[in-house]
Amino acid sequence: MKHEEREVRQIYNDYGDDLYRLCYFYTGNVHDAMDAVQNTLVHLMEYTGTFESESHKKSWLLKVGVNECRQLHRQWWRRKVTADESLIDMEKVGVQTSDVWESVMSLPTKYRTAIYLYYYVGYSTEEIAKIMEKQSSTVRSLLLRARKKLKEELVEPQADSSSRI
């Protein structure tokens, strides 16, 4: 039995913000994120299975969202977002422009997604592994490399500039 509109609406009310943020982190712009969210909701309406728990429901939704983002990324007409558009998009989602935000957004998609799910959503590496369809050890490596890249970009340039003074 397909999910009814009322049930889909409730799931969206419960998890839509998390889904949107994940899609935004993955795609890097508002328009593609909204497309991925919309496609994910269509999949939800067509899904005939049942969810074992609220956690299973959310995990399923985010996993389908990641897959939709991957699909968008594969399409040949994918366009790059300019820096100006990116700043406008960040304002729309209520995120303040900062060095940390810019550094996270400049990470490759696989690192950015892992960072988002771990630090912003609060998932464990095992949960992230299921969503990203990777091994738990791979997720830990992604997080380690992402932290290293962020440290190089954020901490080391400041250390260089302070040593010149």
Image (cartoon, helix red, strand yellow):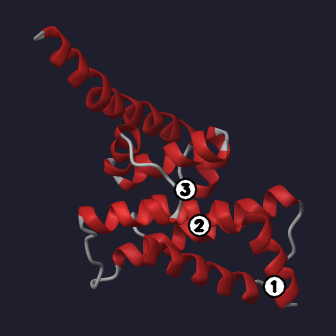
Q: Is residue 136 left or right of residue 104?
A: right
Going by the numbered disc 2, the residue's amino acid type is: Tyr
* Disc number placed over residue 20 in the picture, else none: 2
Query: Is 25 on the left-hand or right-hand side of 99?
Result: right
Residue nearer the viewer, 120 or 136: 120
Task: Using the numbered discs, state the Cα–Cα distance from disc 1 to disc 3 in whole angstroms.
Answer: 22 Å
- For the residue marked with disc 1, what is the amino acid? Thr
Amino acid at pointer 3: Met
Do the numbered discs 1 and 2 sit on residues whose CB atoms are within 8 Å?
Answer: no
Q: CA distance from mark 1 to mark 2?
A: 23 Å
Please provide percent x and percent y for residue 5: 82, 90
Numbered label attached to residue 70: none
Q: Earlier in the sequence, mark 1 or mark 2?
A: 2
Depth check: 38 or 31 in front?
31
Q: Is residue 141 left or right of residue 42?
A: left
* Nearest to N terminus: mark 1 or mark 3: 1
Choose the circle earlier in sequence order: 2 or 3: 2
Residue topped by disc 3: 132
Residue 112 or residue 84, whichever sits in front: 84
Q: Percent from the top left, x then y, of residue 95?
A: 50, 53
Question: Tag 3, which secondary structure?
Answer: helix
Q: Which residue: 59% across, 41% down?
A: 118
Determine which residue is flagged by label 1: 48
Position of the C terminus, as image quadrant, is top left
Horizontal and vertical percent position of residue 156:
25, 21
Q: Nearer the viewer, mark 2 or mark 3?
A: 2
SS class of the residue under badge 1? loop
Badge 2: residue crowd in 10 Å (few <14, some 14–19, many ≥20): many
Image location (x, y in percent) of residue 36: 53, 77
Q: Residue at position x 89%, y 60% from top?
A: 53
| Helix, strand or loop under label 2 | helix
